[in-house]
Image (tube, helix red, strand yellow):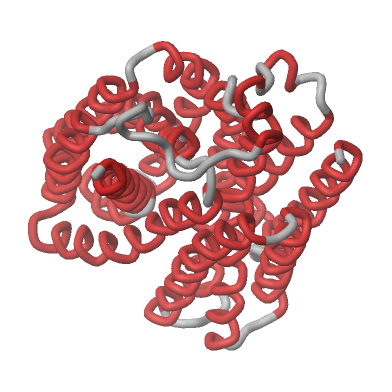
């Protein structure tokens, strides 16, 4: 009976985390580009002015990450998540009545402040609380749903914008967050207890590591902290540059329809990469897994530099999507394994802060490189170098620690 109840609790918990990933990442993060064109047309401004709201959002998220981890340790996560999703939903709904870009900037700054707690940190922190075993697998599956969310919600929101305008699109997004994520957050059980224990048992060494762990202050004295921080910064830069892939494809003279298929290749590859890397992290040596998935990133982005055929570019896009699993699944997993549970949310938030700043700069810088060189190849070359240096940094520090 207890086992059935526990499985029921884990099922509800995984359902909630899955919806955070699908609606949080898949809707809020992956559909914002759909609004740029319609808003720029209505307000008679350039797309760069409209896209500035996402730069401000990511900058606000980066600053918020400085204290988000500490807040999550001190405040009841159920009510904290409910409050954050409420604020995000209300902010989305107010955008339907926006009559100036300033309104957009303010709303997306507010969303950016709430985003680290509601989305970025909540998934790895909650999963870490509930899973002593198979953490990589469940983290990969949960974060992999974000790409499926993007695949599902992009055509839905695009259709709503076509029929009801961009204001209708924001109303739809606000209602989805308010009617689905808010009630789920209010009913979530953030931590296991005696009646609802965590999944799996820990070995003696793992138990000691988790119970003792180390604080952020102690982590700052370990080389592996800086290796993981550098990898997060470098690979989040790569993640931000993905928004330019469709522009790269059309710049090669390929039709927008085929460009969309290349972007779909990235999203499908990212979904497969996140799910599979989590599974292999639980089964194989982390160094071996990182090597293979870093090679996916290197090969995929190299393909974008040298290939011109749409079919080959789509295959290349799928391969670079596989490499996305390193940043979004492997790094949070390794942070938990290296530093334990004691100050996990705080350490993760600081490392993610660097990544958020890198992502906020990435979209602008890669666009600037294109303006200067009339090609995206410089940006893609930086992405290849980012994968190489990130793997080397982690490989050296993990071997020394071992």
Residue at (41%, 43%) from the top-left corner?
51
Where residue 154 appears, as percent x and y from the top left, is 29, 62
Q: Which residue is at the front of the view, 143 or 58? A: 143
Q: Could you say which is closer to the camera, residue 333 or residue 34?
A: 333
Tally the marks: 0
Q: Position of residue 285 (x, y in %)?
A: 74, 57
Image coordinates of residue 27 in percent, x first then y, are 30, 50
- Camera-side residue: 114 or 336? 336
Q: Which residue lies furthest to the front in this view?
A: 1
Give the residue drawn at x 17%, y 29%: 90
Q: Which residue lies furthest to the left in this view?
A: 164
Image side of residue 210 versus residue 199, left or right: right
Q: In which quarter of the image is residue 190?
A: top left
Snapshot quadrant of residue 151: bottom left
Q: Residue at x 59, y 41 (%)?
A: 332
Residue 11 to residue 57: above or below: below
Q: Quadrant of residue 379?
A: bottom right
Asked if residue 32 lies left or right of residue 58, the reply is left
**Is residue 52 in view?**
no
Can residue 297 be seen here? yes
In the depicted view, which residue is nearer to us: 264 or 39?
264
Residue 318, horizontal then vertical, whole percent? 55, 74
Q: Quadrant of the C terminus?
A: top right
User: Looking at the rendering, in which quadrant would you find the N terminus?
Assistant: top left
Q: Is residue 302 above or below residue 379?
A: below
Above or below 125: residue 216: above
Which residue lies at the image location 45% right of the left edge and 66% below the top edge? 267
């Amino acid at each position: 009976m207890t086992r059935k109840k526990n499985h029921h609790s884990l099922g509800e918990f995984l359902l909630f985390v899955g919806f955070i990933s699908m609606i949080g990442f898949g809707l809020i993060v992956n559909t914002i580009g759909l609004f740029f064109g319609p808003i720029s047309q209505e307000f008679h401004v350039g797309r760069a002015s409209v896209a500035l709201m996402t730069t401000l959002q990511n900058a606000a998220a980066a600053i918020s990450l400085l204290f988000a981890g500490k807040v999550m340790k001190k405040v009841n996560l159920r009510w904290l998540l409910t409050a954050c999703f409420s604020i995000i939903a209300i902010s989305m709904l107010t955008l339907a009545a926006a009559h100036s870009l300033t309104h957009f900037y303010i709303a997306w700054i507010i969303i950016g402040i709430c985003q680290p707690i509601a989305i970025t940190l909540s998934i790895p922190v909650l999963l870490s609380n509930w899973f002593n075993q198979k953490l990589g697998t469940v983290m990969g599956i949960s974060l992999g749903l974000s790409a499926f969310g993007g695949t599902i919600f992009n055509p839905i929101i695009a259709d709503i914008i076509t029929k009801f305008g961009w204001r209708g699109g924001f109303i739809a997004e606000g209602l989805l967050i308010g009617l689905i994520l808010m009630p789920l957050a209010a009913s979530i059980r953030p931590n296991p207890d005696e009646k609802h224990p965590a999944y799996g048992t820990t070995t003696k060494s793992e138990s000691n590591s988790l119970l003792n762990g180390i604080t952020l202050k102690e982590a700052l004295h370990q080389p592996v902290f800086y290796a993981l921080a550098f990898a997060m910064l470098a690979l989040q830069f790569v993640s931000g540059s993905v928004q330019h892939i469709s522009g790269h494809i059309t710049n090669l003279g390929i039709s927008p329809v085929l460009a969309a298929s290349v972007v779909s290749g990235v999203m499908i590859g990212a979904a497969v990469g996140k799910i599979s890397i989590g599974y292999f992290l639980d089964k194989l040596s982390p160094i071996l897994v990182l090597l293979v998935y870093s090679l996916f990133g290197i090969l995929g982005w190299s393909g974008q530099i040298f290939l011109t055929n749409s079919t080959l570019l789509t295959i290349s896009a799928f391969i670079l999507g596989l490499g996305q699993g390193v940043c979004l699944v492997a790094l949070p997993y390794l942070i938990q394994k290296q530093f334990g549970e004691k100050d996990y949310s705080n350490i993760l938030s600081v490392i993610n802060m660097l990544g958020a700043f890198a992502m906020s700069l990435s979209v602008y810088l890669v666009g600037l490189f294109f303006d200067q060189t009339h090609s995206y190849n410089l940006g893609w070359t930086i992405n290849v170098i980012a994968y190489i240096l990130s793997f080397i940094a982690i490989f050296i520090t993990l071997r020394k620690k071992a």
